[in-house]
């Protein structure tokens, strides 16, 4: 039955979800084929603990979602031809600075970035958003559909201490291959089974042995003060066909501090099913929270890890956050994957297993850690 459903359906039919006009409210008056009436949409400023399904209802998860939700912004883009486009974005931290992450199909060019209004805290019909602007593109990639915008200004009081810095935990491991040649490979600092470690992809070049591990040195990229942080590897914590986890000696303080920001997820019960929660600006209107089900998680060559899910989204949701809670993910100790919402489509009872509670079939790609 599931196979049959997938045969009728291609993810390439999914559409980018931008809006060409913005609505002040998602009331019944908003025409929408995908989610008529928007009944399952919770205004962000009314989102409370009890909205979470009972199985997931914890204060720490709720706090985490609110932290991320406060980082979701509305983007208003004026294109080169004068047309307007509305989408969503997420604040992210990279090497100590804050940027906006969104889709390439929301902001494609440097000029569009310069003509992009960024609104924080557009959380409900009665809210008072704080406006700022982007000053240009940091980078954009059409193939992976991601853009990173430089911000002119961050609203004063914007909380970001909790945000992991996506640049800080990236490591370069200098080691030798089994034939003795010097080489370097990339890794990521993480917490695995409550132990600070470095996770690397297995490669055909290196077959990790305890001897090889003891010769490996770890470098982290340079930081604000220009100092390099250095550690040795001490042992193999765990290895499977995809990944190897190496322990660090010593664990640099900066890495500890970064990873401790996610400590509330270290002991998350990974047996819990993934719960996708989307926080976006549908129809270019106030921020909304929707909850759905995971349909499938796939690893794709071009897009990386992609989550197909049923959390309702509409035009304007592109670039918003989709948090999949409870996925069996150990990288950086997080048990919540963060995805950038990309595309969606209305379907009708197409996917029967697992059964979805909405007729939305959407896709989001794994991009950043929030
Ligand atoms: Zn809609």
Image (tube, grey):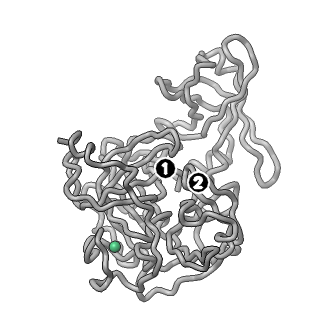
Disc 2 is placed on an element classified as: loop
Q: Is residue 156 visible?
A: no
| In the foreground, 29 or 222 | 29
Which mark is first along the chain, 1 or 2?
A: 2
Residue 113 seen: yes
Residue furthest front as drawn: 81
Relative vertical location of residue 172 with respect to residue 32 in this rendering, above or below: above
Q: Position of residue 253 (x, y in %)?
A: 68, 45
Which disc is residue 142 wearing? 2
Q: Position of residue 149 (x, y in %)?
A: 65, 65
In space, the residues marked 2 and 1 are separated at their CA atoms by 15 Å
Q: Is residue 346 left or right of residue 146?
A: left
Residue at the image position 75 percent from the left and 41 percent from the top: 229
Residue 242 image position (x, y, % from top left): 49, 27
Q: Which residue is mark 1?
A: 366
Q: Residue at x 66, y 48 (%)?
A: 168
Nearer mark to the viewer, of 2 and 1: 2
Q: Is residue 242 above or below residue 74?
A: above
Q: Secondary structure at mark 1?
A: strand
Look at the image and tell me in which quarter the N terminus lies: top left
Crowd band around label 2 with a 10 angstrom C-alpha radius: few (<14), some (14–19), many (20+): few
Residue located at (65% from left, 69% from top): 113
Say the numbered circle drawn on residue 298: none
Left or right placement of residue 174 versus residue 357 in this view: right
Hey, which quadrant is residue 217 in on the image? top right
Residue situated in front as seen by the camera: 361 or 97? 361
**Residue depicted at 69% across the width and 70% down the height:** 111
Could you classify mark 1 by the number of other residues whose Cα lies within 10 Å: few (under 14), some (14-19), or many (20 or more)?
A: many
- Residue found at the far right of this picture: 226
x and y percent of residue 334 in the render?
A: 47, 47
């Amino acid at each position: 039955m599931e196979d049959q459903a997938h045969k009728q359906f291609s993810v390439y039919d999914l559409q980018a979800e931008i809006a060409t006009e913005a609505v002040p409210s998602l009331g019944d008056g908003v025409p929408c084929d995908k989610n008529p009436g928007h009944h399952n949409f919770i205004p962000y400023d009314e989102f409370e603990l009890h909205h979470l399904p009972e199985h997931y209802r914890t204060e720490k998860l709720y706090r985490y979602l609110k932290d991320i939700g406060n980082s979701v912004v509305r983007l208003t883009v004026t294109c080169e031809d004068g047309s307007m486009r509305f989408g969503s974005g997420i604040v992210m931290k990279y090497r100590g600075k804050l940027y906006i992450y969104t889709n390439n199909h929301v902001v494609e060019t440097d000029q569009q970035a310069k003509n992009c209004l960024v609104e924080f805290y557009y959380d409900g019909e009665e809210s008072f958003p704080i406006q700022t602007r982007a000053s240009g593109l940091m980078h954009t990639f059409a193939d992976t559909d991601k853009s990173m915008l430089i911000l002119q200004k961050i609203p004063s009081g914007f909380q970001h201490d909790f945000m992991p810095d996506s640049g800080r935990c990236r490591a370069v491991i200098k080691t030798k291959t089994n034939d003795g040649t010097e080489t370097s490979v990339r890794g990521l600092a993480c917490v695995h089974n409550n132990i600070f470690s470095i996770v690397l992809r297995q490669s055909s070049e290196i077959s990790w042995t305890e001897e090889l591990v003891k010769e490996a040195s770890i470098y982290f990229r340079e930081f604000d003060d220009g100092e390099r942080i250095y550690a040795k590897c001490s042992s193999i914590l765990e290895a499977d066909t995809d990944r190897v986890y190496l322990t660090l000696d010593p664990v640099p303080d900066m890495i500890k501090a970064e990873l401790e920001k996610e400590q509330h997820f270290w002991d998350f019960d990974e047996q819990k099913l993934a719960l996708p929660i989307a926080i976006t600006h549908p129809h270019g209107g106030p921020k909304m929270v929707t909850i759905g089900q995971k349909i499938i998680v796939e690893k794709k060559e071009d897009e990386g890890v992609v989550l197909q899910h049923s959390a309702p989204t509409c035009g304007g949701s592109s670039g918003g956050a989709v948090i999949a809670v409870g996925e069996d993910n150990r990288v950086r100790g997080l048990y919540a994957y963060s995805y950038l919402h990309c595309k969606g489509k209305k379907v009708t009872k197409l996917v029967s297993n697992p059964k979805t509670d909405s007729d939305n079939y959407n896709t989001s790609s794994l991009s950043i850690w929030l």
